Amino acid sequence: MNRSPLSILVVEDHPTIARQIVAFLEGLRWQTDHAATGALAIDLALRETYDVVLLDLNLPDIDGLEVCRAIKARAPRNVPVLMLTARDAFEDKARGFHGGADDYVTKPFDLRELALRCEALARRGRLHVDRQLCIGRLTLDLRDRRALCNGMPVPLTHAGFTLLARLAAAHPSAVSRSALMHELWGANPPDSDALKSHIYALRKQLELVAAAPAIVTIPQLGYRLDLAQAADV
């Protein structure tokens, strides 16, 4: 069965379980990040863009429900959260859903089912994404893959529109280089610095119609969409 690659944040403090989940998902050629603490999970969820967060309830520093609430309240987009826990009482499940969880799996679980649930949550999340993104003078038609800036069409390559849509979806937050590379090439990015070339071309196209630089480089992280500031690649 062919699966579209997903980007997953695995929040699990048990090293063996975490390794099993990450190895299985990476075997599907999905991109995974791992956090063993609630604090790191929140930090990653606010900086990166994930299709699904797999969140263990029992974490060493912050209760999983608090982590879920923080991600739902502060993340730049509504990322689905799949709770992982050994608690199987109805009251525990109710607390999870009331805390913002989108789905719930009790341990032990079948990794194949976990992947299916991730795919279902990712599809559900994408159905609720607006077909049009408007940020200041920039408008993106996600269905027809067209971009307008100051009412003028922006001629973009397929890669250019893909990058611009990802940056616009995360706005005003930055998107890491690794996330952008995964967006373009999945689990098989080129060895060359092709991302930098695509960003350079996208920036030049936007400058032609925006009359100002529109993509800011964030050192040690990635890029951010900003029609009011300038930065060099």
Image (cartoon, rainbow, N blue to C red):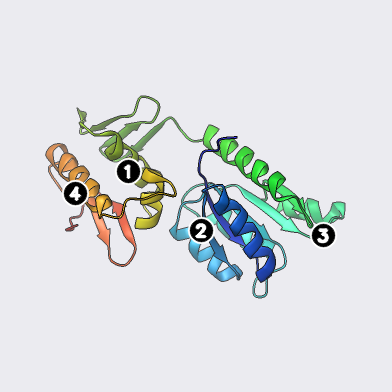
* 32 relative to 136, above or below: below
- The residue where tag 1 is placed is 163
Residue 116 located left or right of residue 226 = right
Q: 16 or 142, which is in the foreground?
A: 16
Q: Secondary structure at mark 4?
A: helix
Q: Earlier in the sequence, mark 1 or mark 3?
A: 3
Q: Looking at the picture, which amino acid does disc 4 mark? A: Tyr
Q: For label 1, count other residues whose C-alpha is less than 10 Å away and answer few (under 14), some (14-19) or many (20+).
A: many
Residue positioned 36% across, 24% down in the render = 144
Q: Secondary structure at mark 3?
A: loop
Q: Earlier in the sequence, mark 2 or mark 4?
A: 2
The CA span between labels 2 and 1 is: 19 Å
Q: Earlier in the sequence, mark 1 or mark 4?
A: 1
The CA span between labels 1 and 4 is: 11 Å
Which quarter of the rendered picture does the C terminus lie within?
bottom left
Q: Looking at the picture, which amino acid does disc 3 mark? A: Arg
Residue 66: % across, % down: 65, 63
* 99 relative to 159, above or below: below
Residue 227 seen from this side: no
Residue mark closest to the camera, 3 vs 4? 4
The CA span between labels 2 and 4 is: 27 Å
Q: Looking at the picture, which amino acid does disc 1 mark? A: Leu
- The residue where tag 4 is placed is 200
Tag count: 4
Residue mark closest to the camera, 2 vs 1? 1
Q: Earlier in the sequence, mark 3 or mark 4?
A: 3
- The residue where tag 2 is placed is 45
